[in-house]
Image (cartoon, rainbow, N blue to C red):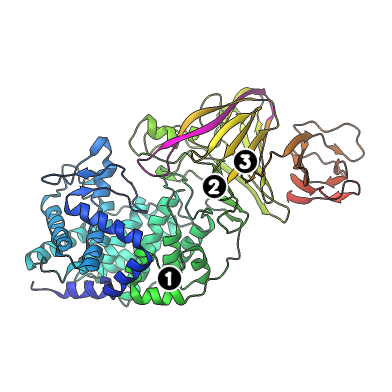
Amino acid sequence: MKNTEWLGRMNKIFGPESPGEITEYCLKNWQEETNHIFSVADHACENVFQFDFNWDMERTIKPVHFPDQIDWSLIPEGDREFLWQFNRHRFLLALGQAYLMSRDEKYARHYVRLLEDWIDHATPGDNIDLGPWRTLETGIRGEIWIRSLPMILKSEAVEEVFLEKVFSCLVRHQKRLAENFGDHKYISNWGVLESCGLFLLSLVLPGSKELLRLALKRLEDGAAIQVLPDGMQWEQSPMYHNEVYHCYLIVLYYGERAGITMPGSIRQTVKKMAYVNYQWMKPDHTQFAQGDSDASDLRDQITAGAAILWDGTLKSGGYQQLDFENAWLFGYQGCEKYAEMKDEKPDFLSVELPFGGNYYLRSGWDENGNLLHFHCGDTGGGHGHADKLHIDLVMRGEDLLVDSGRYTYVDGEERYRFKEAEGHNVTLIDGSGFAPCETSWIYKKLCTCIKQEFFDGKLGGFVEGSHLGYWEKGILVNRKIIWVKPDIYVICDDYLSHDTHTYENLLHFSGHGKTEMENGNVHFTGDGMEAYIQFLQDEAGRLQDTEQSFHYNEKHPNKTYCASTKAYGFFRRITVINGGEKGSTRMVQAESLKLKLAGHQEPLAQEQAEGVRISDGKREYILFLCHQEVMTPTDILCWGNCRGYGKAVLFDRSEEKNKIIPGEILAW
């Protein structure tokens, strides 16, 4: 080629450092991941493609084989997501890694064959935004091509005519990304993924100084608009939070490798988003299947943040040594440096992400910990689900109450079933959800949340939220969650109305366990955990067969508890959950109590305030709940020897039954 300067820049910035040492490191420490890379690469050599990497946005279960000519616009079973995932070319990175680890020329030959075939045959089609040249895939390919191409440059399969084709096509990628950016992309993950591709391409291609500045400006503005002050990407989907986070991380990393002084806002964005991953990580190291998310392991993402930010706290939430992908990203020297970093225990357990409206009550950082997630925030665009006031609950490291997941993006009843309210642990009123879908991406109407208090105390934790999804019916829905540390949860649902309505309560249980009804209550048994769910009101509950999805294109059976109650005016529902070690856990005793105000003989009406007594034979707790304000000038709520006032007050009565005890105010 006449101009090989771009190849030198690409190799210098993106070429893997010490591939021989990385190979030995991965064979020694990450054998399973190494085997997977070779499997993907071997299949690609045979024109067989399946998307099963941890962060493939749309995984596939069935491999697709092209015995002859590859159809880069194939849409199997009506799911266009296959076309787009296919055209992101993740398999090229696997081929490059397999070549460096084996020095087998077949991987380089097929790399060249596949990439050249794509350049020759992947046409824009009648609608460029529906095919291989959709801008999102164009941005992602920009990263994949220039990270993987240096891996095979020394192969005899790489000829000048091939490199000329690649160069011309990269310029075409850069042009398409530069010229197709609208205002709406500042708030979309698309804008970040596309601008990331434009930035990385502009580090390499000649005459790109202005485009480099343009890409960086778009990334800075995108971070300011779509990454919330609490660090969460606004789309209410951990999956797409991490797609955006990955882009900012590699932009920071490769920008600094290229000698660019990167804006402080980019580094701060990486740090905020990395810490959110730590804060919402489940005890099994995965993310919640919130919105359009898979249950992906978060440790590689947290590890990458720890490595680039040199952050020992993040390292404590990631791997103790660089994982397979991060070893190739940061090089062998990066592996050695990371191993020297001291990890530091985090100074947080329970956290609130108030801007996104996500709240996490956590018992500890061990893999047998308890964790409750509560959502009371905006919908989050097309990737957000109708999950207002939804809760997820993990006990002893195992899922108990779950989100149904996403399963598919194909428009239709199945997409709606997973996305709408019925797929979540919420209440349906009068037989309908609060945010019905119009299409796969658009709701017929949205539901406004009212964020309220969050508190993490010594004895207990508290979070509350409301929504106006049924306001046209004159109904306010309110949910209070009280955590009696470490293993009891009280869910208090209030429905404020002036009419008669039917309230259908849904609780989705993990399919990885046994769920059964026992005397009107629910008993769940997992691998090493069991839990009991009881209800303090008369209701005819039943278990029904439903489905849960951990990953795109995957679903499996689970059970959902459903209880329907007709009520007039104010109605409250209280659910008590306790869990612990399998074989040694029993259902706590729970009952509703009548509260009085000091100096008054008559108890308060239930719609005003009530108490809940919880006992397991050794521990006894009294919970005061005010459903409305009841205090006159100098009154105090009373039951037995418990005295206090507040929206929620928790008393530990395990030791003292006679002398007056004050409680812990959880909410005022």
Q: Which residue is mark 3?
A: 531
**Pointer 3 local density, CA inside 10 Å: few below 14, some 14–19, many at least 20:** many
**Pointer 2 local density, CA inside 10 Å: few below 14, some 14–19, many at least 20:** many
**Pointer 1 local density, CA inside 10 Å: few below 14, some 14–19, many at least 20:** many
Q: Is residue 533 left or right of residue 171?
A: right
Instruction: Give the Cα separation between the discs numbered 3 and 1.
Output: 39 Å
Q: Residue at x 31, y 52 (%)?
A: 182
Q: Are marks 3 and 2 in contact (CB under 8 Å)?
A: no
Considering only order in the chain, which callout, 1 or 3, is on the residue closer to the N terminus? 1
Name the residue type under label 2.
Answer: Glu
Instruction: Give the Cα separation between the discs numbered 3 and 2.
Output: 11 Å
Report x, y in % for residue 508. Answer: 53, 36
Q: Nearer the viewer, residue 486 or 269?
A: 486
Report x, y in % for residue 35. Answer: 30, 58
Using the image, determine if residue 322 lies above or below residue 374: below
* Snapshot quadrant of residue 475: top right
* Snapshot quadrant of residue 413: top left
**SS label for mark 3:** strand
Q: Which label lies toward us, 3 or 1?
A: 3
Using the image, determine if residue 441 lies above or below residue 215: above
Report x, y in % for residue 408. Answer: 36, 39
Q: Let me know if residue 498 is in the magenta part.
A: no
Q: Which residue is mark 2?
A: 398
Magenta part mainly helix, strand or loop?
Answer: strand
Using the image, determine if residue 667 lies above or below residue 348: above
Q: Which mark is residue 307?
A: 1
- Magenta residue span: 548-571
Q: Residue at x 15, y 55 (%)?
A: 114
